[in-house]
Amino acid sequence: MAPVPPGVRLLVSFDRDQCLLLNKEEKWPSYLHLSTLIPNSLKKGLILCSSRPHRPDTELHIAPSRYRALTFILTFLLYTSFHLSRKPISIVKSELHKNCSAVSEAAIIASSSSQQPSLLSLHTDVDCGWKPFDKSNYKQLLGAMDYSFLCAYAIGMYLSGIIGERLPIRLYLTVGMLASGVFTCLFGLGYIYNIHNLSFYIFVQVANGLVQTAGWPSVVTCIGNWFGKGRRGLIMGLWNSHTSVGNILGSLIAGYWVSSNWGMSFIVPGLIIIIMGVVCFLFLIEHPNDLKNIYTQNSSLGKTVPSKSWNGVNGHTEVYLQYKDNKNQSYDTELLLPRESERIPMQPVVVVKSESEPSAISFMGALRIPGVVEFSLCLLFAKLVSYTFLFWLPLYITKAAHLDAKKAGDLSTLFDVGGIVGGVLAGVISDKLGKRATTCAVMLLVAAPTLYGFSMISEFGLGPMIGMLLVCGGLVNGPYALITTAVSADLGTHKSLKGNARALSTVTAIIDGTGSVGAALGPLLAGLLSAGGWDQVFYMLMTADFLALLLLLRLVTKELASSKSHPISTVELKEH
């Protein structure tokens, strides 16, 4: 068990109601769903001092709703800050390289006035962009900068999950957030200190990409530890909206500063992620079992219970309520501390020793989990499409709709609004049908022609563009959100793992790491292909969607051939 975060320990010290003293109550509160395992005679006089996450396949459920809600909200905000710090580069691109032809026209008009040539020349140089991105090959340079971040992110992600399973998640995530905030601020300092060296910006992007890999496996592992498989698609769909919320907030913050001082477009998000890193260190609870430390080490909850006043079996001083999984022989325990003046009959309760922690799964062992390879490769192409929009959409809107950087950034947030709806909708549908792969495949099938429609309709004004942004956002981000959250959590707790929850971080890292390869390739290819026209970029995106669909066909066939649907998990697949 990991140490209890200092912030949580401080809060508990002011709240004496964390343990529920059931002294004379005949009826337990409605939110404590206990089966008849515990006789009414035992329910009186007990202090409930620990709880575990909901497990539908067990006979006992004591829901730690307060801490579960805290974990949901906190991990949501933590990863929102990650995406908030990634978005500014796409907003600032149009400021790093401005439309010099428009500036030239303005210069001709201004030349007829009485302005001095030296001032005009200086103004023109500044408006044409920020060196070295003011050259004609600016798209390639901007694409290379995106690629440096995403390539480092993809490589680091494969290692991050393995490291995350062997280190305390809270500390690992905190260090990653603090380092990411520093490197994000460094990029903005390039403006303040007038740095025009491409190597500086490439280095910052590579370093930032590496440290940000601490984020995703850590938050998914935490949320997977706290939430069971019931309605996982809906819960994960709502939770995964942090990606779009972060993109929206990042766009708005960067857009506010982009025209006046684009350095602040990075410094402000960098400071936000640093602050959230401190919050993570103070309050993030990695696993429900960690709550036991609060009560076993806190002796000021009501009456102190001296261990010498009562004894457990075989000399143990902790009494656990044991319950058994219906499908396997693994046991979970709940700590129950008796009142000082009473002894608990030992017949209905069993005292057990805590078992050793399960060993972390190997990389190859994670790849052998049925469905991991297919969903990983599918996410490669799905994330290619999503990240191409993330990094290039504002610049495309600037060129296609002839808007300034701020308006283009604000308009691009509609894509993320559609992504929120698409992610939730994908989760709800997959929960209802019990078919994750089929849900993703249908959305990918519809997304490809929709992307072509977006490239055509965007030329007809803002109205059609707004509608297509919402639709494309939902169809593109729906499968991406479902695979990176609910599917990853399903596979990370697959039955072949025999209850080894430590595989979740590695499985998540493999799936998202493979997807990040596509995320690195998409913006790079967009930078190269856009030189020949934006149509080529959209053809690439449509091709990627069709390839993602093809990679899911085997799983879709398995799901459709299944005689039963399982709303709480992916279809049961045979071992490879």
Image (cartoon, rainbow, N blue to C red):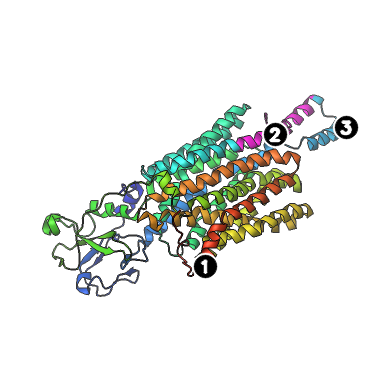
Which residue is identified by label 2?
138
Left or right: 325 as drawn, with respect to 97 = left
- Expressed as whole percent of the image width and height from the top left, the position of residue 80 reads 51, 49
Left or right: 552 as drawn, with respect to 465 = left
- Expressed as whole percent of the image width and height from the top left, the position of residue 515 reads 54, 47
Q: Which residues are magenta?
A: 118-146
Badge 1 vs badge 3, beta-carbon distance below 8 Å: no
- The label nearer to you, 1 versus 3, is 1
- Expressed as whole percent of the image width and height from the top left, the position of residue 258 reads 65, 40
Image quadrant in which you'd find residue 265: top right
Residue 125 on the magenta segment: yes
Residue 258 on the magenta segment: no
**Who is closer to the viewer here, 183 or 539?**
539
Residue at (62%, 47%) from the top-left corner?
A: 390
Left or right: 220 as drawn, with respect to 340 = right
- Expressed as whole percent of the image width and height from the top left, the position of residue 338 reads 18, 63
Q: Is residue 403 visible?
A: no
Image quadrant in which you'd find residue 120: top right
Q: Name the secondary structure under disc 3.
A: loop
Residue count near mark 1 (Cα–Cα under 10 Å), binned few <14, some 14–19, many ≥20 = some
Q: How far apart are the two marked residues, 1 and 2, measured between alpha carbons?
A: 47 Å
Image quadrant in which you'd find residue 89: top right
Residue at (64%, 49%) from the top-left corner?
A: 544
Badge 1 vs badge 2, beta-carbon distance below 8 Å: no
Q: Name the secondary structure under disc 2.
A: helix
Q: Name the secondary structure under disc 1.
A: helix
In the image, what residue type sits under mark 1?
Answer: Leu
**Main secondary structure of the magenta stretch:** helix
